[in-house]
Image (spheres, rainbow, N blue to C red):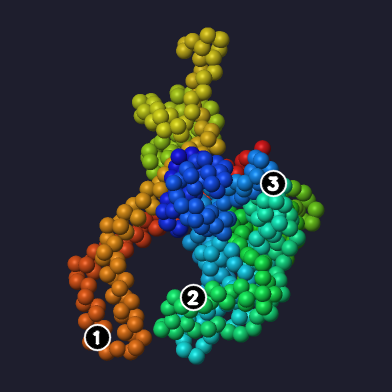
Amino acid sequence: MTVQEVRLCGLLLQQHFGNVVEKVGTHLIRSGVLTLRALAYETKLPLDLVKKSLCVLVQHGMCTFGAGRRGPAGPVEYRINCESIIHMLRYPRYIYTAKSLYGDTGELIVEEILQRGQMTMSSTVRTVADRLTNNMPEGQSMDYSEVVSAFSRLVETHFLQRCPPLASAGSSSSTLDTPLPAATQPTEPESHPDCYKLPYINLTGQGKRRRSSEGGEADQRAAKKARTDNSECGDDGIHWQVNFQRFHLHFRDQAIISAVSCKLDQSSSEIVRTMLRMSEVTTPAHAAFTQALSSNEIFRALQSSYNIARPNLDQYLSLLVDDPMEFVGKTGDSGGGMYVVNLHRALANLARATLESVVQERFGSRSARIFRLLLRKRHLEQKQVEDFAMIPAKEAKDMLYTLLSENLVQLQEIPKTPDYAPSRTFYLYTVNQLPTARLLLQHCYKTVCNLIERRLYETKENKRLLEKSQRIEAILASLQATEAEAAQLTEVEEMITVPERQQLESLRHHINKLDSSENQVDESIFLLESYIKSTQASR
């Protein structure tokens, strides 16, 4: 773990779970593996708080546990999962994707499960139906069957999966004899045949509307009834979690489709979309290629609204195969031609475009020209760079040294003789894409940390004004619910002065810009992480 990754994990834990969980999680990251007693002793926290913090982390799949170095008879040891913590950065994107694919019902299902880590199907259906009913006009309610249908579609497309059984998750130290790294990590679908099997639940009815007079007491009553209701519905002990890997595959596919659309046209992107959709569930997560598809299969799977005739399809496929980006490859001639999407090559090109964009934004278009030239030609001497890039010698030299000082360009020495004499040595400039991608990934982590810290600072500085605004909004909501007079509403609204209102608008504008920047940087993080993992898997 690098310094920036530890810093980012600490900020995300603090933002979502508070200071105590952040302290426990950060200490586990730095220490590696610890027992409960050792963790409480080293963090100087009460044992009860450490237990609750570990429960939160385990509930959200961010901490694994299992038998320690002394074997099953010894104390249980805990290990943090940093990758799952960094996934919290992408929670808004997961929720938005569920909304775009499955509507408001899918959005609330994913939101509830992300918020609680893992839930039973019956509990999720009730909670989502109640929330949807509260937002409906008086007299209308959401039927449980509609929420069950949306939940089923999420499971069928593998966006939700069952949590590993307790026996294989290492809940009991006396029966555990699996190695620690495999203790509670999410399993692959093929590892557990029931991973995507929906249980039969006996659940009928409609969502209940929550009255304004009901407060925390209703939540407490619902929590007490949850266990009884689960056993009555028939899914007690069967918990579901979000399949982050499936969401990441969807993000990868969308990035590839968008790149094809920008490079060629909309029809080409729809053909690639169809190829990816046909193999999205059957292709392994880290495969370099999708499964081979014949042009006949692709033509039958194309939607009629695309208006792509068979001769045009063959032309588009030939164009995609011949394109220098190499997003689509041809593997055979049977069935009109067998085609695959080259996933690893696509990710490499997307990462390359990200690197070029960063160089252009930071150092200008001429430096970006030199960077692209070195990516294409591999190794060049300084004089060759000047000639090929058509840049004056003095400027090219300054730009090369600037890129070299930022570790974006490397210098390779090739001696003619063993003594490495400068007069008898070739000095070649080159760009190693993988190390450069790792370097840029660390810069992205640092940027996200700075954005989160700035947002926390802005919120802390304007805490009093935000609390006042929330109190007034709550008063207005209660008055509107009781159908108060317009004069009363105006009087309450005037409790915030004009300067305070302007300050609030400015604060919201800054917070929105910070959130938008955080999401944009996360897109770069995702592309770079996907490229690095794909490169490691292909070796």
Label 3's element? strand
The reply to whether callout 2 and callout 3 are in contact (CB within 8 Å) is no
Distance of label 1 from label 3 (alpha carbons) = 67 Å
- Seen at 27% across and 60% down, the residue is 462
Point out residue 102 in the picture as x, y percentages from the top left corner: 58, 71
Disc assigned to residue 488:
1
Label 1 or label 3, whichever lies nearer to me, is 3
192, 56: nearer the viewer:
56
- Residue at label 2? 219
Point out residue 538 in the picture as x, y percentages from the top left corner: 66, 41
Q: Earlier in the sequence, mark 2 or mark 3?
A: 3
Looking at the rendered image, the quarter that the C terminus falls into is: top right
Q: Residue type at mark 2: give it.
A: Asp
Q: Earlier in the sequence, mark 1 or mark 3?
A: 3
Q: Is residue 138 above or below residue 298?
A: below
Q: Is residue 392 above or below residue 246?
A: above
Disc assigned to residue 72:
3
Badge 3 local density, few (<14 within 10 Å), some, or many (20+)? some
Distance of label 2 from label 1 (alpha carbons) = 31 Å
